[in-house]
Image (cartoon, grey):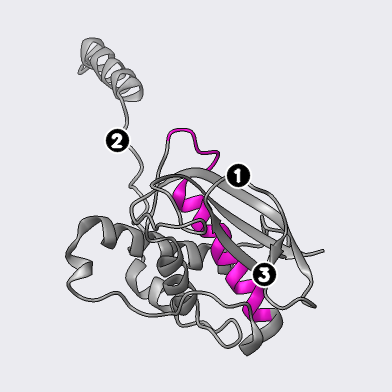
Amino acid sequence: MATTNPKGKGESWVNRAIDHFKPQPPAPKSPAAPPVDQTAWEHSVNAHKVNTLTVHDVGLIVFNETQSVMPNDKANDTVDGARKKVAHAVINGDSQLGKKRPETALAVEPAANAMRDPRTRAAYESSLKAARVAYLDPTDPTHGATHLNLRRNADRSNFESGGPHDPGFRIRTQSGPFDNSYPTPGKRGLPSTGIYVNTYGPE
């Protein structure tokens, strides 16, 4: 009379137990999200209009205003941070006043030869990024500043925009001291170090 093999049955149970405690294969990974085309996104933001200026125009103004500003270990802000505040002031001026916005440097592209210099290229990219970030930023660190100025020291007096009947503009932010790669002579010039990037708003 045939009988079952208790040994075989035991081995089968042991095998099942081992299989139960074996490390199980991990669950399949979710497919990675398709990469974002950062360049296309940047171009899209650059093309947005503030009022009379595009975001790209704002970046060019920031570049031409701050190209010579260099980092300094004593500064209370980064150069990128100062550029972002300048961008906010330009955006505020254009959105509120359009063609009558405060005078700034022109929105002019740097020459091709200048862009071969790594430092110039870095300042250009930093300025365009500052404009994009400021345009998309829901918070304005300048609290509505419309004017900007580079000063030779930490003077916080009002910015006088021109004519004797023009209102003064109170300082809103002051970033610095920074170094300056393009010093200019004279009482109103900018020295090679100790300069500040300020923004101003209506009293």
Quarter of the figure that contains the N terminus: top left
Q: Residues within 10 Å of mark 3 (few under 14, many from 20)?
A: many
Q: Nearer the viewer, mark 2 or mark 3?
A: 3
Closest to the observer, 169 or 84: 169
Residue at label 3? 146
Q: Camera-side residue: 59 or 195?
A: 195
Q: Of circles 2 and 1, which is in front?
A: 1
Magenta residues, start to end: 73-95
Question: Badge 2: few (under 14), some or many (20 or more) residues near its Cα, within 10 Å?
Answer: few
Q: Residues within 10 Å of mark 1 (few under 14, many from 20)?
A: some
Q: Which residue was labeled with disc 2?
A: 25
Q: Is residue 125 above or below residue 93?
A: above
Q: Indicate the amino acid at tag 3.
A: Thr
Residue shown at the point (46%, 73%) measured from the top left: 61
Residue 36 seen in render: yes
**Residue 128 among those drawn in magenta:** no
Question: What residue appears at the point 42 percent right and 49 percent down from the top-left corner?
Answer: 191
Residue 128: in sight, yes or no?
no
